[in-house]
Amino acid sequence: MTKLVQHFLTLDDLSPSTLQGLIDRAIELKAITKQGAIYQPLKNKTLAMIFSKASTRTRVSFEVGMRQLGGGSINLNPNDTQIGRGEPIEDTARVISSMADGIMIRTDAHRQVETLAAHSSVPVINGLTDDYHPCQLLADIQTFQELRGSVKGATFAWIGDGNNVCNTFISAARIFDFHLNIATPKGYQPSTEIVERSSASITLCGDAKAAVENADVVVTDTWASMGQEDEKKQREAAFADFCVDDALMSKANNDAIFLHCLPAYRGIEVSASVIDGPQSAVFQEAENRLHAQKALLEYLLS
C-alpha cells in the first residue's frame, strides 16, 4: 500500500483546525525555547532544503528549527547540484526523498513545487514560490494572536503589490475568518483565480487610505520582489501613493499593528518611522518564522 504523504504547498493543504493547532503549538514551542528547555522530537531526522532563490529568514529559520528539534538539514543550491544541470525534478524528488525525511523548496514557479511533491515519498514544504508563501502566513497569524488574541473578525489591510504574500493573505482571510482590504495600483492586482475563491472575505480597492480605514493590521511588502529588479523604477512610479507612512497608519485603528515579511526598504514601501515605530511587530513576526515552522516540521516529520 502506498503511504499517504502530507505536503504543505499552500494553506489549503491543511484544514483550518489543523492550521490553528499549528499556530497554538508554535506559541508553545516558542515558550519552550525561551525557557531553555531541550525538546528534540526530530532526532536523527534530516530536512533537505532546495534554494533556487536566495534567502535569509527562510534558510536560518528552517536550519535552526531542525537543529532545535534535534534533527539536521542540508542546503542544496541548484548551481552546486545536478538540478542546475537540468536533472528532471521528478528524478530529484525520488532520490532526495529516499534519503531525507522532508524537503523544503524555495523557488520560482509553483508548478515546480507541485511536481516535486507529486514524486516525493516524504513531505514537501513550500518555502516560497511566485504564487504563494504559506510559511510566512503562519508566522503572521501567530504574531497577531500573541498581540491581540484570535484573528477571527479582525480587519487586515494589504497595501502594495498583489504578489505571492498577498495571494496567501487572501486564502488566510477565508480560512481564519478575518476580512482583508487590498489596495494595489492598477495592473498589480492579485491573482483573479485566488481572489474568486475568497471573494466573500476580501475587498479590492485602488485607494490605500480607504483600505486602512479602521484596520487592525496594516501589511506591506517590497514593491519589487526577487527577479523583478529590472522593473524597480517602473514600479516605484506606479506605487508612489502606496508607501505606508505615519499619515497612512493614522487612518487605521489607534492600536493597529504593522507587519512586513522583510526585507524592507525604508523610505520606499514603508517609512522608517513606521517600521521602527511602536506599532511595528515586524521583528517579532520575523522571529516567529522559526517557531511556526518548528510546529509545522513537528507535525509533518514526527
Image (cartoon, grey):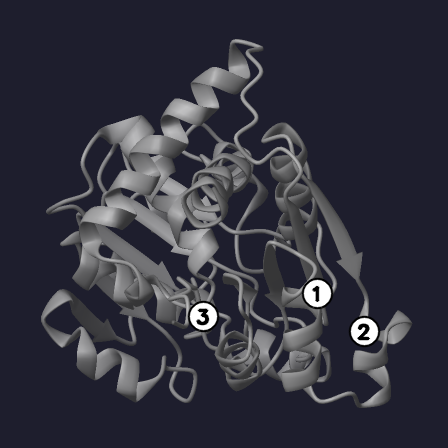
Question: Where is mark 1, residue-wise?
Answer: 50
Relative vertical location of residue 45 with respect to residue 168 in this rendering, above or below: above
The first of marks 3 and 1 along the sequence is 1
Q: Helix or strand or loop: what does disc 3 sit on?
A: loop
The picture places residue 300, in percent across and down from the top left corner, at 44, 50
Relative vertical location of residue 177 with respect to residue 133 in this rendering, above or below: above
CA separation, marks 3 and 1?
Answer: 16 Å
Question: Where is mark 3, residue-wise?
Answer: 132
Quadrant of the rendered image containing residue 62: top right
Residue 239 visible, this orientation: yes
The picture places residue 164, in percent across and down from the top left corner, at 46, 71
Specify whether 294 is left or right of 198. Answer: right
Q: Helix or strand or loop: what does disc 1 sit on?
A: strand
CA separation, marks 1 and 2?
Answer: 7 Å
Between 96 and 158, the one nearer to me in the picture = 96
Specify whether 141 is left or right of 52. Answer: left
Residue kind at label 2, given as amino acid type: Pro
Quadrant of the rendered image containing residue 281: top left
Residue 78 marker: 2
Residue kind at label 3, given as amino acid type: Tyr
Residue kind at label 1, given as amino acid type: Ile
Structural crowding at the residue carrying mark 1, measured as other residues with C-alpha within 10 Å and reported as few (<14), some (14–19) or many (≥20): many
The picture places residue 185, in percent across and down from the top left corner, at 40, 79
Asked whether disc 3 touches disc 1, contact meaning CB atoms under 8 Å apart, the reply is no
Between 94 and 265, the one nearer to me in the picture = 94
Asked whether disc 1 touches disc 2, contact meaning CB atoms under 8 Å apart, the reply is yes
Q: Helix or strand or loop: what does disc 2 sit on?
A: helix
The first of marks 1 and 2 along the sequence is 1
Specify whether 190 is left or right of 151. Answer: right
